[in-house]
Image (spheres, rainbow, N blue to C red):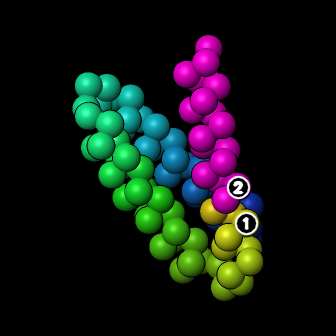
């Protein structure tokens, strides 16, 4: 099994891929972007459950990576 830092790195790489996809499809409707967000979130959730056995660690890592992504996106929107 990967350590928690490795799993967090993989999650952040997936969020970066989501960021690239969203910014390449700039004129899509908001509903498509929201659906795509949940697809990527499901992918991250499934991957994390497969790689980490403890449910508390899964919840913490999922919350941390999603919060980091959303804060980064918010900072890019503000600036």
Residue, x 54% and y 80% (percent of image)?
50
Residue 25 in the image: state x and y as whole percent. 29, 31
Q: Secondary structure at mark 1?
A: helix
Question: Within 10 Å of the Cα at label 1, are there few (<14), some (14-19), or many (20+) other Cα atoms?
Answer: few
Q: Quadrant of the N terminus?
A: bottom right
From this viewpoint, which residue is outermost toward the top?
A: 79
Give the camera-side residue of 28 and 11. Answer: 28
Residue 19 in the image: state x and y as whole percent. 46, 37
Which residues make up the magenta segment? 63-79
Side of 5 where 26 appears, left or right: left
Q: Quadrant of residue 38?
A: bottom left
Q: Disc 2 and disc 1: Cα gap in Å?
A: 6 Å
Residue, x 48% and y 73% (percent of image)?
46
- The reply to whether residue 6 is in sight is no
Residue 8 in the image: state x and y as whole percent. 67, 58
Residue 60, numbered label:
1
Residue 74 magenta-drawn? yes
- Would you place residue 30 above or below residue 52 in this image? above
Side of 9 where 77 appears, left or right: left
The total number of labels drawn is 2
Give the camera-side residue of 10 and 19. Answer: 19
Q: Which residue is mark 2?
A: 64
- Would you place residue 30 above or below residue 55 in this image? above
Q: Quadrant of residue 55?
A: bottom right
């Amino acid at each position: 099994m990967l350590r928690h830092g490795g799993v967090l790195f993989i999650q952040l790489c997936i969020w970066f891929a989501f960021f690239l996809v969203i910014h390449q499809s700039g004129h899509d409707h908001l509903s498509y972007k929201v659906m795509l967000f949940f697809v990527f979130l499901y992918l991250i959730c499934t991957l994390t459950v497969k790689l980490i056995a403890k449910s508390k660690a899964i919840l913490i890592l999922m919350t941390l990576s999603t919060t980091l992504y959303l804060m980064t996106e918010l900072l890019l929107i503000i600036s």
